[in-house]
Structure formats: C-alpha cells, structure tokens
Amino acid sequence: MAKIKVGVNGYGTIGKRVATAVSMQDDMELVGVTKTRPSFEAKTAVAAGIALYVPAENVEKFDKAGIKVAGTIDDLIGKVDIMVDATPGDFGEEYKAKYQAAGIKGIFQGGEEHGLTGVSFNSTANYKESWGVQFSRVVSCNTTGLLRTLSLLDKEYKIENAYVTIVRRAADPGDSKTGPVNALEPSVSLPTHHGLDVKSIMPWLDITSMAIKCSTTLMHIQAVVVKLGKEVTTEEVLDLFKKAPRVRLVSSKDGIKSTAQVMELARELGRSRSDMYEICVWSDGIKVVGDTLYYYQAVHQESDVIPENIDCIRSMCKSMEGPESVAKTNKALGIDH
Amino acid sequence: MAKIKVGVNGYGTIGKRVATAVSMQDDMELVGVTKTRPSFEAKTAVAAGIALYVPAENVEKFDKAGIKVAGTIDDLIGKVDIMVDATPGDFGEEYKAKYQAAGIKGIFQGGEEHGLTGVSFNSTANYKESWGVQFSRVVSCNTTGLLRTLSLLDKEYKIENAYVTIVRRAADPGDSKTGPVNALEPSVSLPTHHGLDVKSIMPWLDITSMAIKCSTTLMHIQAVVVKLGKEVTTEEVLDLFKKAPRVRLVSSKDGIKSTAQVMELARELGRSRSDMYEICVWSDGIKVVGDTLYYYQAVHQESDVIPENIDCIRSMCKSMEGPESVAKTNKALGIDH
C-alpha cells in the first residue's frame, strides 16, 4: 500500500512535533512543512533534511537568510494527500478553501472552532467519526486530556456530571514574552471553553469548567470532580485508568510530586523533544467518596495532541481501524503503555 | 472600661500582624510580643517600641545581638489577660498548659487542630460560639476565606454541596527557600484538609476540596462550585456578596485581572504591610447556571485572619457583640466596606 503523503502547514509548537511524528510512521511520508519567517526553527528543519515551503512573497527573505526553500505553500498543497494545519488560530477558513480547491484532506487544531469542520477528533473517544471525511479537527490539549479519561469513565460508569478546574501554565517553555511571572489569573468568563469543547465530541455530557492561569511553563494540571451513575471503588477507577490508552499513572510515592518530575520522567524516557504524550494521572491522588470521584491529571500542552493527529490521518484516509492505529502510533513514538 | 491586656506569642508572619492590629484598637493594650531568635524582625519590633519577651535560655543571645529584652516568655504570660498564640504549629499543647496554669485566655491559629480548643472562630460564621471561652482557634487563611462567603450563601440559600479547588501559592513573599519555582504540585491526599476545616465551624456542610501548589508568592485563589438549595440569579449572588463583611468585589474590567493587581490595590489603600484583609471575589467571575454557582476568590494568606483574631479577643472577653466588634475592627484597620 502506498504511503500517505502528508504536509504540515505551520512549523510552530504543534506543527514541528507533528512533522517529526509523521516522519516516524512507516505508512506515511512527510512531504514537507511550511514556515512564514526565517526563524531558527526554519534552519533546524532544513538542517534535518525537511523540505521547507514558504509563502511566495517571502521566498526572497529566506534566500537572503541563506535558508534553502523547496517551493511555495501552494506547491506543497499540490503534492500531498492530506495537510495537517497547525497555523495560528483563525487562518482555518482561508486554508480550508485552498485545500478544498486542491481536492486534498485537511486536519485542523483546537484553536479553530468545531464549526469549521463539523467533526472533531479524539483517538479514545470517537476515532470512527472522522472515517473518510475530508476535514476534521483535533481538539486542544486540555480537551484531549479530559476526553482520554472522561470518555472511559462515561462508557464504564455513566457520568452524571463533571466539574473541572484547570490550572493553566502561563506560557510555552520557549516563550519569554508572556506572564504572569508571579501571580494567579482566573478566567472570569464562565463557564470556560474547555468543558464546552469536550461537548464537541461528547455532546451529552454535563460538564463545566473553570480555569486559572499560573506562573509556570511546564504543564497544565486539571482537578477533576466526577459524579458517577453508580458507586465504584477507588481501586476500580485505578484499574480502569491502568488500561486506558495514553494515560500514564504516576505516583508521588515514586518521587513524582509535581509537573517538574513528570517532565523529568519524559526526559528519562528518551522521547523526541522530551515530550510526554500521555495524560499523567496521580495514582495516589485518585479518591472516590460515595458516588463522586476526584483525581488530578497533568497535561503536556505541546505534545498530548501529537499522537491524535497521527491517528486522525489514518482515520480520515481509511487506512486502519482505531485500536490498530493507536497501537502503531504508540509503538512508533515510544509510548510503551 | 479597662483595656484588654493582650500578648502575642510568636512574632512571625501572623504574630507581627496581630501585634500591629492590637496596637491599633483603642480597647486593647499590646503588652508585648515574644520571639525566639534575634532576627531582623526582633530588631524592627524593638525599634517600633514593642516590648520583646524571649525564652529564658535565649536572653544572653539577644543581649549579644544588642537587642533590648523586656523579660522572658513566662514574664509576659504573667502580665496579660489573653495571649494570641502565633507560634509554629504543634507547640499548642505545651503553651495551652502554660496559659491554663496562669489562668489566662489563649487564641490559637489554624496550624493547630480544632481538638486543641474544641471551638474554632470566624467572625461572620460563629462569633458567638467563642463568647467567654478560655481557649479558641482562629481557622486558617483558606478556611477563613471560604467561611466568609459560604456561611452567607448557606444562610441565604441553603448549600446542598460545595466543591473547592484551591490554587495555593508556594511560599510567603518573604520566603526564598520554598518552591516550586516552575511547576504545579497537586495535594494528592484527598480530600484535602481545607474542606474538613470548614466543617469545624459548619459541621453540617457537604464540602470537599482539592488543592494544587503553584509557583507564586502573592495569594491563593479558590475556584468554588456550590450547588444551592434554590434557584437564584447571578445578580442576587452579586448583591449578597456586596453586603458581605470583609468580602471585596474586584473586577477584571477595572484592570484587576490577577492576584498581582489585587496586591497592588492593597498598596494603594495604604494598608499596614500592604495587606488585603478582605477576601476578593471577582464580580465578573460569578456565574449561576441552573442551581449551581461558580465563583473565584483570592485569599491573602498573611492577613485575612488578622481582623478575625481581633474579633475573637472581644468575643472571648465578652466585651461586645459581633456586628459591633466587626465594625470597630474594620474601622481601626481601614477596611472601608
């Protein structure tokens, strides 16, 4: 079977990781990536042998910076079966029209509205719903994290309602422009979009979210309170999470007391860019009281959606079933669940 | 009427603030404070004319440091009607025995267990319960913050249950030893003590709490979800909080987007040590959906319990009724509610 020809539009935080992940799949070919400015990331991409496509009007700028360009963004669109669009939010409409005109498929990210594609994607919750579609959308990092655990809890125990407080990091680790530096900033517009976005995939779910931005760059933490349709034990939930795809149990008893140690663990695992693709749930921070379950999970903002993008490509290209794709992606990325 | 003779045992974060607040009340006399080590705070206390009492075995150490001592801790115990005990947690038992032997009253802080005194104190929730008692306990900063709003909500609407996620600061502003510096640390032992401690004053309340420690030194933020016994509007809750004692409404529309601006506001108000005694609730972050209320409030860890300590003295000494004491304390401390 021919390899799926994949392009990545936008080589920022998500785009560069999707590009690396695509290049690690034996059933995909990374045709090229796009970049608008001749930044250090454009240089490292070219140095790594990745074909770089740029806006027609910027070719000269890249030439002057001594960065070798393979062609324009339109050239790349003409060469691929599917484009993973990791451009900044709100460019979606414009690029969707271009992909449509070229007759290629397109995957958008959580920065775009669900309405752009009409279907959103999460490997655990709804792999099949993107089967064969021309356009889909991989939901944001926080939403992906919530779906990995909530979809299983709902399937197994039926969720009556869920309250989530998201303690958000202030900035990407490579960002030195954003704050707060030493403060907490509540998202006053309630309920926040995170719970609503979970409903783009589980519309029946009664879920509300609040969010507070914090002075940290590593990961988000979600404090989750779930009222279940039946009484279960803490041990049963622990067993469910043990079997959950892309959920990693961590324990403060192992010395993983904070997001700092979770990120240190990712480094020890030898992951590309030291990423933690799994949602990390504290096993000693799971507690059921009556019919209510409490737990904490950490979300690596830059990377948890990367395996979902790979699976989404396969679902849209009808190349294999969900469990098979998840296992294949995991193996390629070193997720040894 | 004779002034109430007050001593403060321990001159740390809480003790030094209680001492200042006592000295600002016209019905109280600050007899002296205690300090175990000749730190910069011992020096500034003496420079401010406060009589300093130290452990008998440390008198020489203070002499050598050139700090004038008024006597030993036992001397101070012999001179006061009531001691506000702000020693580090777990010294309570030992000092309680000394106060008992001397026949004086004693107020402990939230670091001690409720069981030490059998009665805990909050001005809004249960001023009368400490009336005339020999020993009471002012609950911790987070518990004080929760009681200020929850006790009113329960009185007005009957709370069915409450979930609180506490986003905790990592350290006091004057502390350079503690972390995390750039991470989030969940309190995995669930439910956390905060909700349980609210029950030391409102034992009938169905409340659970989770907590996450963050890289900030300014304030805590509490994300509160309350299911009410009746349907109310967001405006009704806003009106209730407007009338609440020691609750200050702040708004992101006024530029108060985070705890950094709350603390800047306290500086503008000219408060002692730039403290924010009130619990600050974001007025544009209050939202009722059906019978469930969501809101954020910021807690100034060093100072919200200070006015409660003053009121607790008056309740224990039977000097005046609750509303009268709250108004008097507020006026003295510049809380212009």
Image (spheres, coloured by chain):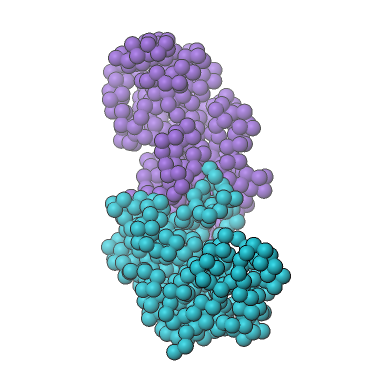
Chain colours: A cyan, B purple
Residue B110: give x, y in percent of width and height: 39, 35
Query: Residue at 49% of width from left, 42% of height from top?
Result: B216
In this rendering, is residue B45 above or below B165? above
In which quadrant is the C terminus of chain B drawn? top right
Residue B127: give x, y in percent of width and height: 46, 33
Residue A163: give x, y in percent of width and height: 46, 60
In this rendering, is residue B75 above or below A218? above
> In the picture provided, is A196 more to the left or to the right than B119?
right
Query: Residue at 61% of width from left, 75% of height from top?
Result: A70
Q: Farthest residue in the bottom direction?
A: A1
Query: Residue at 33% of width from left, 36% of height from top?
Result: B113
In this rendering, is residue B4 above or below A260? above
Query: Residue at 38% of width from left, 59% of height from top?
Result: A266
The foreground one among B271 and B243 is B271
The foreground one among B111 and A45 is A45
Asked whether residue B199 is in view, the answer is no
| Residue B54: quarter of image | top left
Residue B98: give x, y in percent of width and height: 29, 20
